[in-house]
Every structure is written in C-alpha cells, then in structure tokens.
Image (cartoon, grey):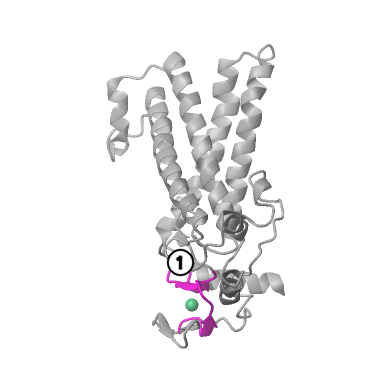
C-alpha cells in the first residue's frame, strides 16, 4: 500500500533529523496561529469596538487571514512536496541507504551516490540530514526539517514572503496597540535576558508578554526578508544556493521563474493549492541546457 510505503520512507529519512529541528518546526506551527488568535480575538476587538467598527475590523482580519493561511499552508507544503529521488529514480523498496561515503564521480555528467546507491543527475545532491538525494537541491531548511529542492522551492519562497509580510504587519499592529494600551517599563525588557524568566518563576507581566511578541516579530521580519532577497536573487539568476554565478542554468528571467514556480508562476502567490506545472522534472538538466544553448 502506498500509504505504508510512504510512512516507511518517512521513518527512514526522519530518524536523522535532530530534536532541535523538530522543536523549531513545532514552535513555528504553534506560534503562527497563536499570533493570529491574539490579533483576531483580543487586539483588533479592543481597537475597533464591535459591531460599529466591523468594517475596520474586517479590513484587518481578511488580509491577515489570507496571510496566515498562505503562511501555514506553504509551510506544510514545503514538508509535504518531497523532492527526493525516492519515487522518481528509485522505488521505495529500492531505497536502502548504506555506506558513509558521499559522492564518487562516475562519468562526466553522471554522479553516483554511494549512500542511496544510484546514479543521480546534475544538480542532485545527497542531504546528510534527510539521508537521501534531493533533485535540484537548494538547501536543508531547519524549520521545516526538510530539504528544499526541485518540487518544493516554490512553497518555500512564498512561505518566506508571507512570513516577512505577516511579521511586518504584526510589528505595526502590536506596536500600535502596545503604545496606546499597554504600559511597558524598563524592567519588562529584562524578560529578554536568557533564563531570567526561570529565575523569576515565570511571573510574566502583560508588558513582558508584549515585549516578547514584538521581539520575536523583529527577529522574524529581519531574517525572513534578508533570506527572501537572497533566494529571489538566486532564482533570478537560475541558481540554487551552492551554485556559482557561471552556472549553466540561467534560461532567462521568465524561464527561471517558471523553473521554480511553474507555468502559472504569476498566480502561485494566491495559494499553494493552485496547480502550476513545472517545465522540468529535475532529472534531465543536461538536455535542457543543450536545448537552450542551441536556440
Ligand atoms: Zn544519496
Ligand atoms: Zn535535507
């Protein structure tokens, strides 16, 4: 049965994932809905008295819901849309990772992975954490505990975009609310000192809670926007993280966008459920490069 096979593959690949990664993943999955519920059920009703302020309330809630929906679904899609060679170059039963060696070169354009025990195409690299070869491997994402590669790079990039947008929005909203409704003293900032909460016995004040909420958003907006700029620049040039400028895979801006986001790249921001067929399968890079060179 496909579901048992999938579960077995998952168990084979997940066992090397660290405890820290799983905690970070859980942290995000809990934190995002928490912010949403605090906004929708506490901050916004306090700012706009209902029902007279319903229009203003909905003006915030609708775009916020759209952002949080895309944030969570793209995040889950990064984990779900597997980019590994299993199911493509190897069947589930053929995938029996062995050995400790990395790659050994076989021919000019064909590499052999001694761990997955198969020939792997160009741009395919073995991830030591996932313990499997990943097609068009970009990098291993610690938060989603999975590799970003050929089939899930789209979701990863939209996740970053929505994380930047939602964090920026939260800073404005929570900052505004805090300024008018919450009294923050200098001592409230002590909550940011590591282990201070443990020493004080977890007696958090309202001011301290809002200091933490704002700080987490400041970290999120800084990290996600810098990462987004970095990764979009790579997409623009037809590169993955570890590839250099002189890479062969720059097919022009439009084709580079299609390669990552699919043929309907211009509407994939609306939802991860929008089907957008990728022009390449992540395996025949050699022929695609030749095809473009001869044009
Ligand atoms: Zn491998
Ligand atoms: Zn990985």
| Residue at 71%, 51% in the rendered image | 274
Residue 66 position within the rendered picture, expressed as x and y whole percent measured from the top left: 64, 37
Position of residue 287 relative to residue 233, above or below, is: below
The boundaries of the magenta stretch are 114-135
Front residue of 33/62: it is: 62
Number of numbered markers: 1
User: SS of the residue at dot 1?
Assistant: loop
Front residue of 243/18: it is: 243
Residue 285 position within the rendered picture, expressed as x and y whole percent measured from the top left: 57, 73
Position of residue 166 relative to residue 144, above or below, is: above
Front residue of 118/34: it is: 118
Residue 200 position within the rendered picture, expressed as x and y whole percent measured from the top left: 29, 32
Determine whether, in the image, residue 38 is placed left or right of residue 245: right
Residue farthest along the front direction in this orientation: 295
| Quadrant (top left, top right, bottom left, bottom right) of the C terminus | bottom right
Residue 116 on the magenta segment = yes
Using the rendered view, name the quadrant where residue 40 is placed.
top right
Res. 74 visible in picture? yes
Res. 85 visible in picture? no
């Amino acid at each position: 049965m496909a579901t048992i096979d999938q579960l077995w593959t998952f168990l084979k690949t997940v066992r090397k994932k660290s405890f820290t990664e799983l905690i970070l993943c859980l942290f995000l999955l809990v934190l995002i809905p928490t912010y949403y519920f605090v906004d929708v059920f506490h901050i916004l009703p306090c700012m706009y008295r209902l029902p007279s302020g319903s229009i203003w309330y909905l003006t915030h809630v609708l775009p916020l819901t759209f952002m949080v929906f895309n944030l969570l679904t793209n995040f889950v899609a990064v984990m779900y849309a597997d980019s590994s060679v299993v199911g493509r170059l190897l069947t589930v039963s053929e995938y029996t990772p062995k050995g400790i060696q990395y790659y050994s070169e076989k021919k000019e354009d064909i590499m052999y992975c001694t761990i997955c025990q198969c020939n792997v195409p160009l741009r395919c690299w073995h991830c030591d954490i996932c313990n499997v070869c990943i097609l068009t491997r970009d990098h291993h994402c610690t938060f989603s505990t999975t590799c970003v590669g050929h089939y899930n790079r789209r979701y990863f990039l939209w996740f970053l975009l929505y994380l930047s947008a939602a964090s920026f929005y939260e800073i404005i909203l929570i900052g505004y609310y805090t300024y008018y409704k919450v009294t923050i003293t200098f001592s409230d900032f002590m909550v940011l000192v590591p282990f201070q909460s443990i020493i004080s016995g977890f007696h958090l004040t309202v001011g301290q809670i809002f200091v933490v909420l704002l700080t987490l958003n400041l970290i999120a907006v800084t990290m996600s926007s810098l990462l987004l700029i970095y990764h979009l620049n790579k997409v623009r040039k037809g590169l993955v993280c570890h590839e250099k400028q002189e890479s062969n895979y720059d097919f022009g801006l439009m084709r580079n966008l299609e390669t990552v986001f699919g043929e309907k790249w211009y509407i994939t921001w609306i939802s991860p459920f929008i089907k957008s067929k990728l022009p390449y399968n992540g395996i025949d890079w050699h022929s695609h490069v030749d095809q473009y060179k001869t044009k």
